[in-house]
Amino acid sequence: MKSYFSLLLILLFISCNKDDSTNKIQTEEDILQYIEDHNLVAEKSNSGLYYVVETQGEGAKPNSNSNVTVNYKGYFLNGSVFDQSSAAGISINLQQVIAGWTEGITYFNEGGEGILLIPSQLGYGSKNYNGIPGGSVLVFDIKLLKVN
């Protein structure tokens, strides 16, 4: 009986000391702190997407159904990169990407550059996806190379 009690105490101790920080849901407060820490001038859309237009661009403006070529780097608020295109970019349809891209890319004209700060509900939600922890805010440096 004593060994069962000891085992129960050990299991209780382990479960109480479990580090859940890897699944922390990031919030708008985290985005606002990032914007402040990096001295960004960001706009907020009705959906909760924050975006920074560094260069508007002068070419065609895409809509949410457009095929585009985009050069990008995707990273977390801590600066850790999770994905990056080649300099030539990738060609995609804006209906085949996360909602934050479908909306965010449309704020730029061809040749435009900027930053998208995508809350989890416009990214991959609360579930882990392909190395991206659920609840993560995603940051993308983007350059809209072409509206195809």
Image: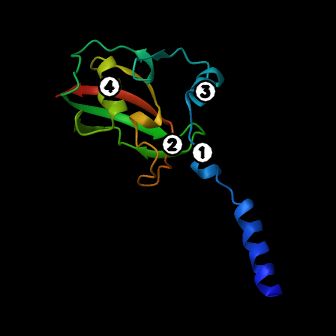
Counting residues from the start of the chain, the first of labels 1 and 4 encountered is 1
CB contact under 8 Å: marks 2 and 1: yes
Residue 19 % position (x, y)? 68, 56
Residue 20 % position (x, y)? 64, 53
CB contact under 8 Å: marks 4 and 2: no
In what element is the residue under mark 2?
loop
CA separation in Å, label 3 and label 1: 13 Å
* Residue drawn at 32 percent across, 15 percent down: 57
Q: Camera-side residue: 12 or 73?
A: 12
CA separation in Å, label 4 and label 3: 21 Å
* Residue drawn at 35 percent across, 38 percent down: 87
In what element is the residue under mark 3?
helix
Q: Which residue is mark 4?
A: 103
CB contact under 8 Å: marks 4 and 3: no
Q: Camera-side residue: 136 or 57?
A: 136
Instruction: Say which amino acid is labelled 3.
Output: Glu
Q: Which residue is mark 3?
A: 29
Above or below — where is 27 with respect to 124?
Answer: above
Q: Quadrant of the C terminus?
A: top left
